[in-house]
Amino acid sequence: MCGIAGVWNVDEAYNVIHDVLLTLQHRGQQSAGVVVNGFKSVKGEGLVENVLTPERYLPGNKGIGHVRYSTYGSLDEIQPLTAHTLKGRISVAHNGNIIDADEKRKFIMGSGGIFATTLDTEIIIHYFSIAPYTNPRESLQWAFSRIKAAYSVVVLHDTFLAAARDSFGIRPLFYGKFQSGYIVASEDVALRVIGCEDIVEIEPGTIVFFTDRTPPEVVRFAKRNDRFCSFEFVYFARPDSNFYGVNVHEVRKALGMKLYEEHKLGADVVVPVLDSGFSGALGYSQASGIPIEYGLIRNHYVGRSFIMPKNRQDIVRKKLSALSAVLEGKEVILIDDSIVRGTTMKLIVEMVKEAGVKKVYVGIHSPPVIGPCNYGIDTSRRSELIASENDIKSLQEYIGADRLVYLSVGAYREVFEKCGVHGVCMGCFDLNYPA
């Protein structure tokens, strides 16, 4: 996951990046960082509000920022990363994982390169530095043309701001006009909240350069081959975000409707697992005619359990509570977006049973997660994925449900095609990876 932001020629860049990252906080809660004019930085572990405080304000009208959920490197290695090169100073904020990072790291170190971190993000800086060009823009193009995936990146240089996506467009990135300059963000909702105009989704395989000259210059460095992460629609993104011109909430709702079409499970009430399960539950309710209820109440002051590094079970108990007045004596369908490791759903089923349900069914509006992801999700080991080693019946017994149903891969793909989203990556569901 991770969320990135960039600002060019906008007053009080520090405050603007703060507000953009605040809107992207759901993409990472472990650390936050910002680099502004003069490559001065503020970084720290924790939430945006606790790291980018008014007391630490840095003046300037350009900069980049990052909120992190770690899939690579240690927790104390906080982005953006900054380095001095013969082609000028450079600072990078990165969303994604470079799939052949170990090989590229060995190549660079074998040539005498030295790394200051274990982050794969640092490879981008090294490739920029060793590129056979003196021009920094050409060097950046060369670097990205040789790094396959996965990245959406903002780069601050002495003379420009750059925003780039890999040729597959696995991770999202947008920019919009603001005041006399531009803002870049991982999701378009962050730009809309700020008040940007003329919001553009950056094309896969391109770099957008922002300089004192207008308008922004788009440069293609690789052939476009769209394989956008479908999990962005299912779980990562805010429901008010849009990718490829399609709203996340509407896709999740359509997935929930399709789940009912496939399985037609009946019950007294549909209960969403908040927050990302709500849209799918709404779709299931609308398709089935079964009323939707708040049978689970969420404490919004506790972070998302998927991206918290420790004590997952304690976090689930603290962030969700079952509402007995709604659940007691009822047959309940719990709707959620996915099951990755299974521990969270097992606890939720236990909580619902403690509230006195008659029967509890679980409906998942995506297919079983059977494959690891090396593109920026914390599921890089197949052994962590409960569906990779167990059939549906075994999973049903493990989580304690009276019945468990998933959306099939074919139905899942059909929803995206019907919604007008073509070229998605479904590797974690069907093992068909783009790279």
Image: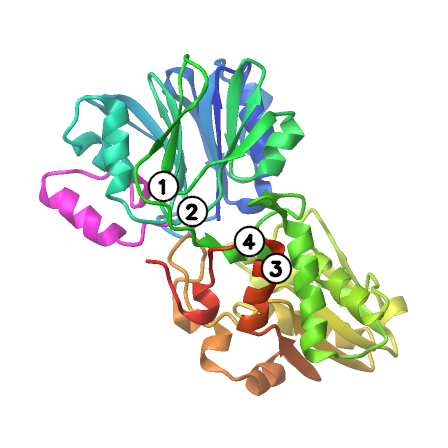
Write the residue at 49% across / 17% down: 58
Q: CA distance from mark 2 to mark 4?
A: 13 Å
| Circle 4 residues within 10 Å: few <14, some 14–19, many ≥20 | some
What colour-coding does the image apply?
Answer: rainbow
Write the residue at 58% across / 20% down: 178
Which residue corresponds to mark 2?
169
Q: Nearer the viewer, residue 2 or 29?
A: 2
Which residue corresponds to mark 3?
418
Q: CA distance from mark 4 to mark 3?
A: 8 Å
Could you tell me which quadrant the C terminus lies in? Answer: bottom left
Which residue corresponds to mark 1?
205
Disc nearest the viewer among 3 and 1: 3
Q: Position of residue 402 (x, y in %)?
A: 71, 84
Q: Is residue 291 above or below residue 387?
A: above
> What type is the residue that disc 2 sits on?
Gly
Q: CA distance from mark 1 to mark 2?
A: 7 Å
Report whether residue 349 is seen.
no
| Circle 1 residues within 10 Å: few <14, some 14–19, many ≥20 | many
